Amino acid sequence: MTTVPAPSPSNPETPSIPETLRELRATFDAGVTKPLRWRLEQLDALERMLRERDHEFADALEADLGKSQIESFMTETSVTISEVAHLRRNLRRWLKPKHVRPNLAVAPAVTYTVREPLGAALIIAPWNYPLQLALAPLAGAFAAGNVAVVKPSEHAPATSAALAKHIAEYLDPRAVRVVEGAVAASTELLAQRWDTIFYTGGAKVARIVARAAAEHLTPVTLELGGKSPVFVDDTADFDVAARRIAWGKLLNAGQTCVAPDYVLATPRAARELAGRIPAAVKEMLGERPKESGDYARIIHDAHFERLESLLEGGRIHSGGSREASTRFFEPTVLVDVDESAPIMQEEIFGPILPLIQVNDENAAITFINSREKPLALYLFSERKSVRQKFLRHTSSGALAVGLTVAHVSVPELPFGGVGESGIGAYHGEASLDAFSHRRAVLRKPSFPDTLRLVYPPFGRTGARREIIRRVLGN
């Protein structure tokens, strides 16, 4: 497959973005992508690519984000392989028509729904998990029978180049293209008419995507983020909570859309966590996190400087050391946090963890509900009544009790936000819903028209009453 970068005078033979889209639509219109066999072949090829090129992708992720081989496999390659395998294993069953009972007005008839692919999908991937968040949506697009353009993030150039190279090598070039580039490429892509747009990133750019999609009434799936809170009360196992919160925060140096953004804790829990979270960090990264081979780096200088400015919103309790030249930012616990400071108004997206005291679960729920709906909400409590309160009185993309982040690895669970944290969901069968349309089908037998019996002409009250009596058996 030919990689399609943004049009350039120095590369006149490269198809333009409109021409690329026309070629993909021709493939779709010819029915190439609709057979089940083709869809399964592409999923097989996608998994083979991830397995055979694992080390190359890991090298690219290390170059872009400083990710270790273990973290790259755990959070990028293996979770994507799991998603692809789950789609392949269940696809035949999910694509079967779903029969529904016809009502009296049309009976006898056959009524059912079938999933039909939407057509040409645009997938815009972010930089924080540039492999997983490009390929997992692509797997869903293929499973649903679509053609697609993948736009990797320019902020992860090594991974972008690896995706362009290997997608061209392994997948059907008639059905998928990679467009590399920055804002100009994204702008031109969004100017086209797509049948669906799948975007992962921040709310600011999501609004640009949504406005562009509205020009053509194109459906969108927006996978965003926000401030995912944690609540810990006195009944929690503090050692377990500290380790699991720290683990979720340390992944990709906190540059994860479902990372614990801040912790709300009862006074006793806050005191316990203030000592145990730094201890958990040391357990995972050692005394000198900078020297650990398992800790990622901040993506670029501008984001590093932004994180530094957020430290002004509280007092550093632990951590806080950093090195601008290597973009190392030590995991940092912040206390005495000013709730009106920028760090509590925007997603942190880095290894800073504010720790805030609240009186009880009711105060925590009020605090959470006064802000935008988060992508994930985490709870550490052994009290069933507390768990039920959070389930009934909060709203979030997901609610996880006793663990952070790992819910995204369960293929059967839909992954998506609500409100400011996103529109739509994917993973497993939800990916088919994101990239297909449930088409209603009615098939009526051709023997004499029974509709005349159910709806006789007006004015024939006696005839209508007689028909109802016969139909109901009275």
Image (cartoon, grey):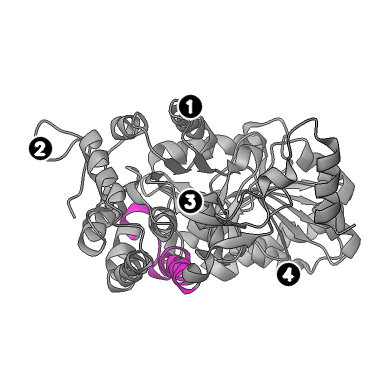
Q: Is residue 272 above or below residue 339?
A: below
| 347 to the left or right of 266 | left
Q: CA distance from mark 1 to mark 4?
A: 46 Å
The percent position of residue 474, horizontal first and vertical second, equals 90, 57
Query: The residue under label 4 is which amino acid type?
Result: Asp
Which stretch is magenta? 62-89
Q: Position of residue 399 (x, y in %)?
A: 71, 56
Within 10 Å of disc 2 (Cα), the crowding (few <14, some 14-19, many 20+) is: few
Q: Which element is circle 3 on?
A: strand
> Circle 2 — which element?
loop
Distance Cα–Cα, label 2 vs label 1: 31 Å
Between tags 2 and 3, which lies in front?
3
Question: Image point 24% across, 34% down: which residue?
Answer: 18
Residue neighbourhood size for the residue with mark 3, other residues' Cα within 10 Å, grouped as few (<14), some (14–19), many (≥20): many
The percent coordinates of residue 129 (x first, y second) are: 43, 54
Q: Are marks 1 and 4 in contact (CB under 8 Å)?
A: no
Local secondary structure at mark 1: helix
Q: Quadrant of the N terminus?
A: bottom left
> Which one is earlier in the sequence, the residue at label 3 or at label 1?
1
Q: Secondary structure at mark 4?
A: helix
Q: Which residue is mark 2?
A: 11
Instruction: Tell me the residue that label 4 is attached to.
Output: 239
> Which is more N-terminal, label 3 or label 2?
2
**Distance in Å between CA atoms under marks 2 and 3:** 35 Å
Q: Amino acid at mark 3?
A: Ser
Q: Which residue is mark 1?
A: 211
Asked if labels 3 and 2 touch by Cβ distance under 8 angstroms, the answer is no
Which of 340 and 147 lies nearest the eye of the viewer?
147
